[in-house]
Image (cartoon, rainbow, N blue to C red):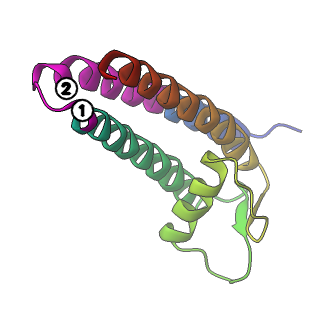
Amino acid sequence: MLTPIHFVVATATLATLVVCVSIHGVAAAFLMRRLPALKLHAAATVILMVLGLFVAHVVEIWLFGILSWTLVQFEGAGAVVGQQDVMTVLDHVYFSAVSYTTLGYGEVYPVGPIRFIFGTEALTGFMLITWSASITFLEMQRFW
């Protein structure tokens, strides 16, 4: 049965998804526009592109991690459980990174409605990492 917390989790997850895709799009457009204007060596341009996209991924992982940590504070939202009793915000960010990269170690896992966050995050991360790889490939083709 769907409860109000299900709608809160779904709405917050979808809002975070939109924010992450927007961050990634803005970062990619900025890097693709600005880096060639710097007239750097081709290798330096590609390295800066990769580092810039990496920073975007880290911000996106943190957003999902903070979202999950925030939502578990609400009654009925669920929890992220694992090898320790109390999950800190850094534990949530760690699990966010594992989900975002689709690594899935399995020593920490979500229960309850917040599972929706991590399923969505895995698909989002897969798509954004693929997008980054495509952008990097295009930049390497342009410069090399």
Instruction: Name the residue at the right extreme.
Output: 1
- Decide: marks 1, 2 in contact (CB < 8 A)? yes
Circle 2 sits on which residue? 35
Q: At which x and y percent is residue 13?
A: 59, 37
What amino acid does circle 1 point to?
Thr
Q: Residues within 10 Å of mark 2 (few under 14, many from 20)?
A: some
| Distance between mark 1 and mark 2 Cα atoms | 6 Å
What amino acid does circle 2 point to?
Leu
Instruction: Name the residue at the front extreme.
Output: 144
Q: At which x and y percent is residue 45?
A: 24, 32
Picture quarter with the C terminus:
top left
Q: Is 20 colored magenta in this rendering?
A: yes
The magenta stretch spans which residues?
18-43
Q: Which mark is residue 45?
A: 1
Left or right position of 15 against 144: right
Which of the two discs, 1 and 2, labels the residue nearer the N terminus? Answer: 2
